[in-house]
Image (cartoon, rainbow, N blue to C red):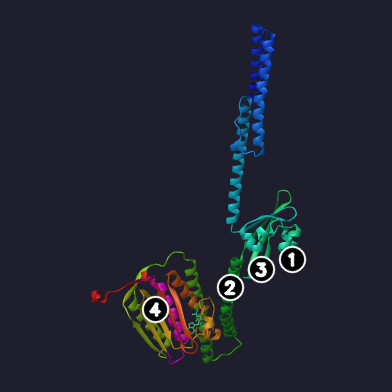
């Protein structure tokens, strides 16, 4: 028996006991009068509490619930406890739901919940972006009315969701999405979308790279195997002069493959190394002079080569990497400058930054090519690059080395007049040598 009942029956029993006592003490009339008065008081008490309760029921909020008296007090306290625990459970559910929604909003993948009629019940902002939908305006709409792509419609209708659907979108910025459908609950569906544009791009780059390398190796390998066949054909009578010529061509092709493999290895070492460059103090003047010597050697007297060092300094960086990058710039200047041209190799300071520059009076580059020059195998003129021993990887190597040193490559060029390639190192890698103190 609950406590409210116990209190009610207790009050009734007390009244009955009082009436019995009055009967015995002062007679039946008084006992009846007392019982009637007591019952009236009890009814009044219950009517008052009932009125307060009915009034509260019009707007039943936990905070305004009446306290009540007697049996009502116990019953209302019980009700209050019940309301409180329901409010707490509701609050917990609301917090859990808000947390779930916040997690859904933050997901880098798109999530859409569809009901059995394929209507959108909920979607996160990523899915809205991926599918071009707006849940505030489109809530309750069937997704098949909003995403009209035929492949999507066929996929959703097929019920075969083992493999994800790949959607290519040409609208706006071209992008590639994968889309998965997962059945759950009562014929509901979870639609997951993921943007794989970057992965696709990297895949294409990888495929292009392999195709380019194979293409680069194909010619020298074909030439070499042709000559090997010719030289090993005993029926073929070759003069000493012819043999010398063939062997010369063969070693030229072998050198070409060697250069390509060396550049590929350099590039792969640079790309796979997460470690910062092996920092050393590089004296700039001897480095610039060494580059000048290299230019003269490559040029073989065909160009006028000059070097200049405006301010003596030390550069912090990997000697091997920096000198290989600058050698590439020097070799390009020599290779792309016709005989009689001039090449100027210099070092100067610019607002504290250290600038190595290689300037030539060569063939120059049209503006439209400049942004792409550091891509692997990008060449303005394929045959000119190959004839002069180029691998198409030089500037890609330069770019990598400079990036690893937080330095940048600046290219200025005028078609037909010449180019200047500058490697700009940040001030914190440059230490000016105090000439007076050094002396
Ligand atoms: P390559 O081995 O072909 O020279 P690089 O990556 O070093 O490859 O250079 C990419 C392309 O940039 C070259 O093929 C050439 O067309 C152009 N280029 C680079 N340096 C110069 C330069 N100093 N003058 C004109 N063109 C240049």
Q: Please report the bounds of the magenta region as a residue range.
A: 315-341
In the rendered structure, are the residues bearing label 3 and label 4 in contact, judged by CB atoms less than 8 Å apart? no
Element carrying mark 2: helix
What residue would you read off at disc 4? 356
Label 2 vs 3, first from the N-terminus: 3
What residue would you read off at disc 3? 169
What residue would you read off at disc 2? 210
Q: Residue at x 64, y 38 (%)?
A: 60
What residue would you read off at disc 1? 150
Label 4 vs 2, first from the N-terminus: 2
Element carrying mark 1: helix
Residue density around tag 3, few if under 14, some if 14–19, many if 20 or more, within 10 Å: some
Between 426 and 78, the one lying in front of the other is 78
Q: CA distance from mark 4 to mark 2?
A: 33 Å
In the rendered structure, are the residues bearing label 3 and label 1 in contact, judged by CB atoms less than 8 Å apart? no
Q: CA distance from mark 2 to mark 3?
A: 27 Å
């Amino acid at each position: 028996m609950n406590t409210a009942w116990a209190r009610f029956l207790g009050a009734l029993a007390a009244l009955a006991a009082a009436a019995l006592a009055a009967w015995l003490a002062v007679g039946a009339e008084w006992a009846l009068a007392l019982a009637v008065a007591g019952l009236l008081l009890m009814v009044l008490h219950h009517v008052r509490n009932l009125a307060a309760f009915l009034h509260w029921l019009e707007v039943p909020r936990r905070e305004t619930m009446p306290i009540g008296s007697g049996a009502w007090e116990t019953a209302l306290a019980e009700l209050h406890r019940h309301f409180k625990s329901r409010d707490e459970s509701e609050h917990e559910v609301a917090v859990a739901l808000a947390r779930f929604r916040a997690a859904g909003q933050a997901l880098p993948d798109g999530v859409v919940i569809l009901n059995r009629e394929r209507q959108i019940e909920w979607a996160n902002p990523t899915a809205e972006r991926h599918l071009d939908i707006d849940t505030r305006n489109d809530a309750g709409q069937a997704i098949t009315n909003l995403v009209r792509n035929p492949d999507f419609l066929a996929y959703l209708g097929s019920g075969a969701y083992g493999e994800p659907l790949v959607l290519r979108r040409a609208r706006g910025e071209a992008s590639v999405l994968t889309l998965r459908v997962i059945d759950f609950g009562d014929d509901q569906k979870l639609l997951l979308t993921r943007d794989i544009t970057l992965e696709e791009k990297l895949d294409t780059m990888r495929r292009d790279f392999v195709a380019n390398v194979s293409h680069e190796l194909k010619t020298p390998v074909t030439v070499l195997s042709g000559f090997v066949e010719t030289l090993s054909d005993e029926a073929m009578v070759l003069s000493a002069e012819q043999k010398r010529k063939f062997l010369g061509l063969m070693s030229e092709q072998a050198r070409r493959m060697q250069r390509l493999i060396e550049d590929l290895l350099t590039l792969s070492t640079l790309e796979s190394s997460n470690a910062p460059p092996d920092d050393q103090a590089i004296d700039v003047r001897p480095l610039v002079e060494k580059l000048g010597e290299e230019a003269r050697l490559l040029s073989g007297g065909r160009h006028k080569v000059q070097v200049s060092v405006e301010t003596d300094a030390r550069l912090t960086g990997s000697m091997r990497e920096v000198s290989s990058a600058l050698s590439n710039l020097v070799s390009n200047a020599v290779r792309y400058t016709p005989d009689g041209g001039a090449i100027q190799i210099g070092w100067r300071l610019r607002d504290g930054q250290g600038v190595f520059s290689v300037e030539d009076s060569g063939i120059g580059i049209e503006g439209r090519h400049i942004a792409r020059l550091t891509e692997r195998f990008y060449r303005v003129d394929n045959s000119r690059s190959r004839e002069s021993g180029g691998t198409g990887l030089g500037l890609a190597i330069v770019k990598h080395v400079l990036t690893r040193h937080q330095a940048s490559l600046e290219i200025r060029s005028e078609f037909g007049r010449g180019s200047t390639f500058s490697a700009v190192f940040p001030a914190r890698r440059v230490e000016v040598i105090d000439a007076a103190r050094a002396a």
